[in-house]
């Protein structure tokens, strides 16, 4: 960890009316690292993700992103065009529900190609080649490149969303419960796939999940949230095998053992 | 005509529209909102074009009005007569003689010059409206020049049909900046938009927008490097004048599948016939 962090947040706080969602959250993410944010519903995980990605403005604190040239950008002080450009190129966002980010009336190839075209690709053949390669990479039959997403299963949709998000090779991907809403065997395959992609491409990721197994599989580090605070943070195996905070102990012990 | 101001609209309204036009010319391809008035003709018949024409018309102007290239259809005849009565301007059907040409869905075949103004009637000024239902978001996309989504539409066409399947209202980039609707002219006419010596004004009455392409402005039709823009035209010669380079209308002439192709630009066709060009049916007509 000699590199400076890619994303670092200090003292983030946010309240919806008088209900606190975040209270003094500090967080660092290094290049190529997957950080899992775990906690029960309402613990502020998704709010944290939205604040870090600039989709929500915090009441206090700063989040800084370091671009490839090493310059630091305050995510919330950035001009809207710059932030949008960042979201189109350097960043990616994987939603729990793929329908939120996919264009359901546009073919699979068009969905993968959209980010490329938004980034300026203007060669149909090249876009098609890249889209085909990405579909293969996420284990979707390339012959389905011209099919509409509504003919896809839930697992395929999620994989298509991942292909679309990664097509521009972002450095940082925000993932909001990427395996939520999928059945267990599909989840396992998807996790396997995401783990491979993240490792091969060296993507850094903030992964929000309530599922400790997902965190165990994908993340090197883990942050446990409760009531808008990070109560425990550390290496995933360390935290899960030897939880220090009573809440983490409760979380770990509530996992069903088969 | 008694009881009406020159060219129907009152002077304050014309000033307001001229201000919008000046702004539109200053930002080529950008849609400028304006306070569109009720006009004595229905929406969709050219309420935007007619307001633009009324605002720029001077007493020495010579007006030509075409509808799908023709001078003799209802829409063209009634708008031409409207201005002959309310402004007393001279009207013509000859493209060369006109100083202001109001058009619906065509650009004349005859090359326009720097002393002419072409006024388009526009039903839907927003090229993004099928892709982005929110107008606020559409404006943001224009502001940030985020036009990737439009290329997704072209991509889908090529993937599905092997070519871009937009035959009219083919989106263009004006001055390398704004994605713009050329109004529903055939894609065949798109190349004429590029560096046209005449000023081009676009009026959308129902949508309350005016935009412009100033003279000699770069206008590019959207395409892919390996699927360049190709204007389409029926593979035939005009049955009346024999023209092989003009845009043709297909006319059904009986109920047994008989049809003929004729120039959509009636003035151009008549001019060629006057000069002695004859098509296969030209002698009979």
Image: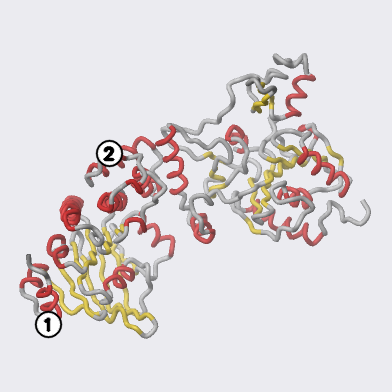
Residue toward you, B81 or A23? B81
Mark 2 nearby-residue class (10 Å; few <14, some 14–19, many ≥20): some
Q: Which residue is mark 2?
A: A142
Q: Which residue is mark 1?
A: A246
Q: Is residue A254 visible?
A: yes
Q: Earlier in the sequence, mark 1 or mark 2?
A: 2
Which residue shows up at 80% across the image and 48% down it? B57
Image quarter (top left, top right, bottom left or bottom right) of the N terminus of chain A: bottom left
Depicted B192 relative to depicted A170: above or below: above
Which residue shows up at 71% across the image and 41% down it? B118
Question: Which disc, if any, is residue A174?
Answer: none
Q: How is the image coloured?
A: secondary structure
Position in image of residue A22 (x %, y %): 29, 79
Image quarter (top left, top right, bottom left or bottom right) of the C terminus of chain A: bottom left
Residue toward you, A208 or A168? A208
- In this view, the residue farthest toward the right is B2
Gap between marks 1 and 2, in whole Å?
A: 49 Å
Left or right? Give the position of B82 relative to A46.
right
Left or right? Give the position of A216 relative to B263.
left
Label 2 element class = helix
Left or right? Give the position of A236 relative to A85.
left
Depicted A76 relative to depicted B189: above or below: below
Task: Tell if the residue under mark 1 belongs to the same chain as the one under mark 2.
Answer: yes
Mark 1 nearby-residue class (10 Å; few <14, some 14–19, many ≥20): few
Task: For mark 1, name the chain.
Answer: A
Q: Is residue A169 visible?
A: no
Which residue shows up at 68% across the image and 50% down it? B203
Residue toward you, A244 or A144? A144
Position in image of residue B207 (x %, y %): 64, 55
């Amino acid at each position: 960890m000699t590199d400076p962090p890619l994303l670092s947040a200090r003292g983030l706080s946010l309240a919806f009316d008088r209900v606190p969602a975040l209270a003094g959250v500090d967080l660092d993410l290094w290049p190529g690292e997957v950080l899992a944010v775990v906690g029960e519903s309402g613990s502020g995980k998704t709010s944290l993700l939205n604040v870090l990605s600039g989709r929500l403005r915090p009441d206090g604190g700063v989040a800084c992103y370091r671009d490839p040239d090493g310059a630091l950008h305050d995510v919330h002080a950035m001009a809207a065009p710059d932030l949008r450009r960042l979201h189109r190129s350097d960043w990616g966002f994987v939603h729990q529900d793929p329908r939120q980010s996919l264009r359901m009336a546009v073919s699979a190839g068009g969905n993968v190609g959209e980010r490329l075209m938004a980034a300026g690709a203007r060669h149909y053949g090249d876009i098609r080649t890249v889209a085909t390669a990405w579909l293969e990479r996420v284990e979707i039959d390339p012959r389905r490149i011209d099919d509409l997403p509504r003919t896809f299963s839930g697992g395929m949709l999620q994989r298509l969303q991942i292909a679309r998000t990664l097509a521009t090779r972002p450095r940082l991907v925000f993932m909001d419960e990427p395996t939520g809403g999928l059945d267990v065997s599909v989840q396992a395959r998807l996790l396997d796939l995401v783990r491979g992609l993240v490792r091969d491409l060296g993507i850094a990721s903030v992964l929000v999940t309530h599922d400790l197994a997902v965190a165990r599989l994908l993340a090197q580090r883990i942050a446990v949230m409760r009531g808008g605070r990070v109560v425990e943070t550390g290496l995933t195996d360390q935290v899960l095998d030897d939880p220090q905070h009573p809440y983490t102990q409760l979380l770990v012990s509530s996992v069903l053992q088969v | 005509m008694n009881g009406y101001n020159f060219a129907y609209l009152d002077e304050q309204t014309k000033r307001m529209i001229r201000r919008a036009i000046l702004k539109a010319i200053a930002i080529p391809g950008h849609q400028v909102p304006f306070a569109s008035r009720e006009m004595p003709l229905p929406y969709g018949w050219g309420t935007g074009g007619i307001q633009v024409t009324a605002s720029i018309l001077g007493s020495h102007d010579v007006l030509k009005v075409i509808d799908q290239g023709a001078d003799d259809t209802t829409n063209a005849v009634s708008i031409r007569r409207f201005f002959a009565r309310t402004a007393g301007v001279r009207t013509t059907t000859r493209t060369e003689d006109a100083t202001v040409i109001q058009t619906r869905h065509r650009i004349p075949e005859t090359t326009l010059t720097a002393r002419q103004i072409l006024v388009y009637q526009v039903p839907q000024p927003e090229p993004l409206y099928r892709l982005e239902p929110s107008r606020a978001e559409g404006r943001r996309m224009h502001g940030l020049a985020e036009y990737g989504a439009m290329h997704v539409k072209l991509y889908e066409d090529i993937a599905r049909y092997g070519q871009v399947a937009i035959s009219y209202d083919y989106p263009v980039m004006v001055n390398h900046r704004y994605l713009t609707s050329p109004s529903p002219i055939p894609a065949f006419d798109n190349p004429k938009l590029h560096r046209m010596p005449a000023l081009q004004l676009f009026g959308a009455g129902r949508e309350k927008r005016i935009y412009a392409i100033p003279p000699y402005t770069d206008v590019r039709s959207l395409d892919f490097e390996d699927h360049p823009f190709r204007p389409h035209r029926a593979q035939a010669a005009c049955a009346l004048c024999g023209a092989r380079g003009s845009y043709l209308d297909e006319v059904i002439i009986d109920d047994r599948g008989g049809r003929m192709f004729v120039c959509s630009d009636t003035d151009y066709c008549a001019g060629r016939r006057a000069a002695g060009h004859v098509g296969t049916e030209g002698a009979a007509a």
